[in-house]
Amino acid sequence: MPTFNKASFIQQTLLSIYQQSYTQWRLLVIDDASTDRTPELVKSLLTTPRAKLVQYKVNRGIGHILNQALSMVNTKYFIQVDGDDWIAPDTLERLIHRMEKEPDSVALAYANTIHWHQIGGVDYYHKLVRHRPFRDRYDFAAYDPMVQPRFYRTACVRQVGGWEVDDPTQGRMMEDRRMLLRLLDRFTFAYVGLAE
């Protein structure tokens, strides 16, 4: 979980992990030098030895944070849940179930996304984005929304060298889309629809 100044959302994000039906998860929160109460809130909510907080003193950007996380991951798969996102209780179970059926050439599983807006501290449903499968990297490049949740096969992400941080933005912008395009050069994705 990469995070930076997400104090308004981080409790709900962490609770969504704790409430997963799949219980063999591990949680790594990497805080990118937040200047709000995010680290303090995370520390108060890390109630299991399966969860760990790493804090940077200098803001490096999300690409660097994700590469740090990748260097610490020791599981076959990992999911990126940003500090202002949350996942449904059966998300991990469904994504692991699907990836276990797929060949090693499948680098990513993703599902549908629900967007919420927060107004005055209250969450309001905005819309459901039903994603779709992609034929190739060009089909994905022309697709406007970003797929979430992103459930990666660790070995595939390592094979493409992790997240790019040497571009003009130093990995601070569009790191998600750029990673997926790199993966699609060598691998395929699995879309987990509503019926699965």
Image: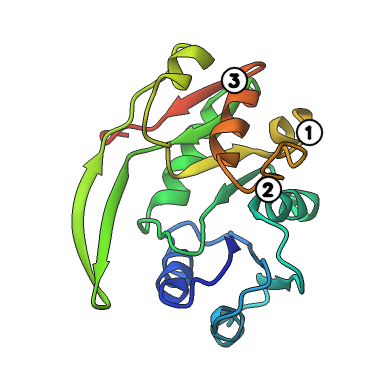
Are discs 1 and 2 less than 8 Å apart at CB? no
Residue 54, image x and y in percent? Answer: 73, 71
Position of residue 90 in the picture relative to residue 176 (left or right)? left
Q: Relative to 31, say whether 61 is above or below.
A: above
Q: Residues within 10 Å of mark 3 (few under 14, many from 20)?
A: many
Reading the image, the residue beneath label 3 is 184
Count of labels shown?
A: 3
Mark 2 nearby-residue class (10 Å; few <14, some 14–19, many ≥20): many
Q: Residue at x 78, y 33 (%)?
A: 161
Counting residues from the start of the chain, the first of labels 1 and 2 encountered is 2
Q: Position of residue 27 (x, y in %)?
A: 62, 64
Work out how far the residue at label 3 is from the one at label 2, CA to CA, in angstroms.
Answer: 18 Å
Which of these two is toward me, 159 or 8? 8
Position in image of residue 171 (x %, y %): 68, 44
Read off the residue under disc 1: 161
Q: Earlier in the sequence, mark 3 or mark 2?
A: 2
Tag 1's secondary structure?
Answer: loop
Query: Please, what is the three-letter code of the amino acid marked with disc 1?
Result: Gly
> Which residue was labeled with disc 2?
63
Where disc 3 sits, the SS reads helix
Kind of residue sitting beneath label 3 = Leu
- What's the residue type where badge 2 is placed? Gly
User: Which quarter shows the C terminus?
Assistant: top left
